[in-house]
Image (tube, rainbow, N blue to C red):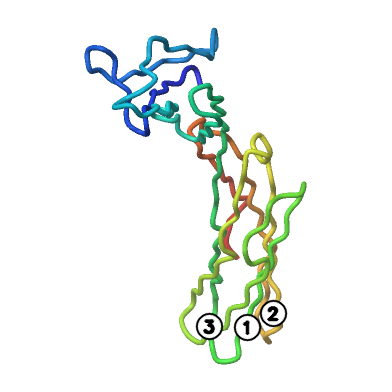
């Protein structure tokens, strides 16, 4: 982040300055440190435990504070994104009937993350369209800037039915900078079989 704001806590509550305002400090890359002085050591005879809390942690970051009054604040950026890979089997020339069974398999290149289900079988008995889903494909920061190609193939051996040709889906992963990844999808021909 370009800056972070931290609040000083006294016994777990917002510490106040002499005018009753919360004590906060904005840290920037120029310093990334701050010091607050002239703090009372005791309240009602008891030692005050000072600590820090980060205010408004930037989107996509987690904040871990180690130590109390003399603390180290570590911000770690993480981002995720996903895409659900679905398809539709369309029959032309006849409707689905009892005994129809079609299996769709997804494969990928370049070590691409794969969906929850890499193979799905459908057994529709009526109509001319049947949908299927491989489930979600999840992406992390390690995938940013990469392009992956997924290929969906169909198998089945019903008399008089010709399996569809393989379909490809290409995706490129980009970081939105706010803890989310953009999965930009471009299909070759159609992304459904």
- Mark found first going from the N terminus, 3 or 2: 3
Could you give the CA–CA distance between mark 1 and mark 3, rounded to whole angstroms? Answer: 7 Å
The residue sitting at 64% across, 67% down in the picture is 117
Could you give the CA–CA distance between mark 3 and mark 2, rounded to whole angstroms? Answer: 13 Å
Q: What kind of element bears circle 1? A: loop
Which residue is tagged 2?
156
Relative image position of residue 96 (x, y in whole percent): 53, 84
Residue 105 image-quadrant placement: bottom right
Which residue is tagged 1?
101
- On screen, residue 81 versus residue 8, left or right, reads right
Please say if 36 is above or below 164: above
The residue sitting at 50% across, 28% down in the picture is 68
Dot 2 and dot 1 residues touching (CB under 8 Å): yes
Relative image position of residue 50 (x, y in whole percent): 42, 26
Instruction: In this rendered view, identify the residue nearer to me: 113 or 160.
Output: 113
Query: Which residue is farthest bottom?
Result: 98
Instruction: In this rendered view, identify the residue nearer to me: 40 or 1.
Output: 40
Query: Which residue is farthest front?
Result: 45
Relative image position of residue 101 (x, y in whole percent): 62, 83
Disc 1: CA contacts within 10 A as few (<14), some (14-19) or many (>=20): some
Query: Which residue is farthest left?
Result: 19
Please say if 176 is above or below 26: below
Q: Which mark is residue 124?
A: 3
Q: What kind of element bears circle 2? A: loop
Please say if 18 is above or below 153: above
- On screen, residue 23 versus residue 67, left or right, reads left
């Amino acid at each position: 982040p370009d800056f972070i704001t931290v609040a000083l806590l006294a016994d777990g509550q917002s510490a106040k300055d002499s005018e009753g305002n919360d004590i906060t400090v904005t840290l920037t890359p120029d310093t990334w440190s701050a010091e607050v002085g002239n703090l009372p050591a005791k309240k009602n005879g008891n030692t005050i435990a000072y600590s820090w809390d980060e205010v408004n942690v930037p989107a996509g970051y987690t904040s871990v504070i180690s130590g109390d009054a003399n603390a180290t604040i570590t911000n770690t950026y993480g981002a995720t994104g996903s895409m659900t890979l679905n398809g539709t089997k369309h029959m032309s020339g006849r409707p689905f009937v009892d005994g129809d069974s079609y299996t769709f398999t997804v494969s990928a290149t370049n070590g691409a993350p794969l969906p929850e289900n890499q193979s799905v079988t459908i057994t529709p008995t009526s109509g001319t369209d049947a949908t299927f889903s491989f489930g979600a494909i999840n992406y992390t920061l390690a995938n940013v800037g990469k392009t992956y190609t997924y290929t969906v193939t169909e198998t089945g051996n019903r008399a008089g039915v010709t399996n569809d040709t393989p379909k490809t889906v290409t995706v490129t992963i980009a970081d939105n900078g706010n803890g989310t990844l953009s999965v930009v999808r471009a299909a070759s021909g159609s992304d459904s079989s």
